Image (spheres, rainbow, N blue to C red):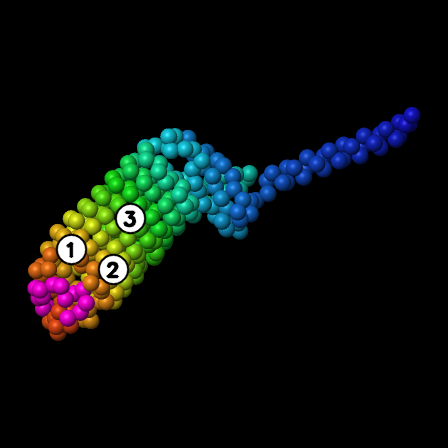
Amino acid sequence: MKNSSQLFAFARKTATATLLAVCLLTVASCTKLRSGQSFVAESDGINYRYEVIVSNHNYVRVTPVSGPEAVTGAINIPSTVRHEDYTYVVTQIRANAFSNYTGITSITIPGTVSIIETNAFHNCQSLTNVKVSNSISTIDAYAFENCSQLQSFHFATSLSTLGQGCFCGCSSLTTADLPSTITAVPDEAFNGCTSLSSLRLPATIMQIGNKAFAHCTELRSIYLDRSVQQIGDSTFYDCDSVQSITCLTPTPPTCSVTTFGNMPTAIPVTVMMSSIYNYQVATGWNRFTNYIGTY
């Protein structure tokens, strides 16, 4: 049988080991998460998953865990979230995050968010309003595709990148006032925006992609500043309500035979006086018969 001193030593070792284990567990539970790790937290009754993307700045991307039936009405995406004694900052909305959440009527995106990833709000068919700050720099491909009730969108002055088909099928969208920070309109960006009535692109736009404004059947006027160099295939195809085009580029922007397909050919096309002949013989532009010169 062990004597009392041996029992005391054994008890002390056991207590020390237990205390050490508890301390290690406590430290582990409060360790700041690294890139790629994630956690779930609730905000306004909605459970979100937050994935760390830049660990040294505590930046995370967000996606709902709660299903479409539980995420309806007006949604406020949180700007920060607290987890294990650390505060994380929401800077991105994850790809497909709210795709097919058809009960959402409005979204408020906080000023911390700079990137809306691919298909983030695809097919949110009840979405009518998006409140977004001037922090947004990137709207990825098909981010708002088929948001058929979306009537307007504030294009932030910080916006530098639009992805393919970002507003494709937004059939209630009436304006597309792009900021001067944009240099290109991607393929299919506003394809099927059948309520879009006028188009005045900023002077910074150099390229307009394939089918970017195809099937915009309510489009009445098109204004292209002098920076436009290239217009893609079927860019304005089936814009059959257009009543006038103004293009101030001295050299006709490169087009294809389908760029202005199914558009009236006798509408007035205003260009620089010295450029009329060049437009009359340029591919795509040569389908129009009523050129007006301006200085």
Residue 13 at x, y percent in the picture: 80, 34
In the picture as drawn, the residue positioned furthest to the top comes out as: 1
Magenta span: 281-295
Circles 3, 1 touching at the beta carbon (< 8 Å): no
**Element assignment for label 2:** loop
Q: Earlier in the sequence, mark 3 or mark 2?
A: 3
Mark 3 or 1, closer to the camera: 1
Residue 270 at x, y percent in the picture: 12, 64
Q: Earlier in the sequence, mark 2 or mark 1?
A: 2
Q: Which residue is mark 2?
A: 233
Q: Locate the N terminus and report the quarter of the image it occupies.
A: top right
Q: How far apart are the alpha carbons under marks 3 and 2?
A: 18 Å
Q: Earlier in the sequence, mark 3 or mark 1?
A: 3
Residue 167 falls left or right of residue 49: left
Q: Mark 1 Cα within 10 Å, few/some/many (few <14, many 20+)?
A: some
Mark 3 or 2, closer to the camera: 2
Whether residue 57 is visible here, answered yes or no, is: no
Identify the mark at residue 87; answer none if there is no mark.
none
Q: Which residue is mark 1?
A: 262
**Element assignment for label 1:** loop
Residue 187 falls left or right of residue 59: left
Q: Mark 2 Cα within 10 Å, few/some/many (few <14, many 20+)?
A: many
Circles 3, 2 touching at the beta carbon (< 8 Å): no
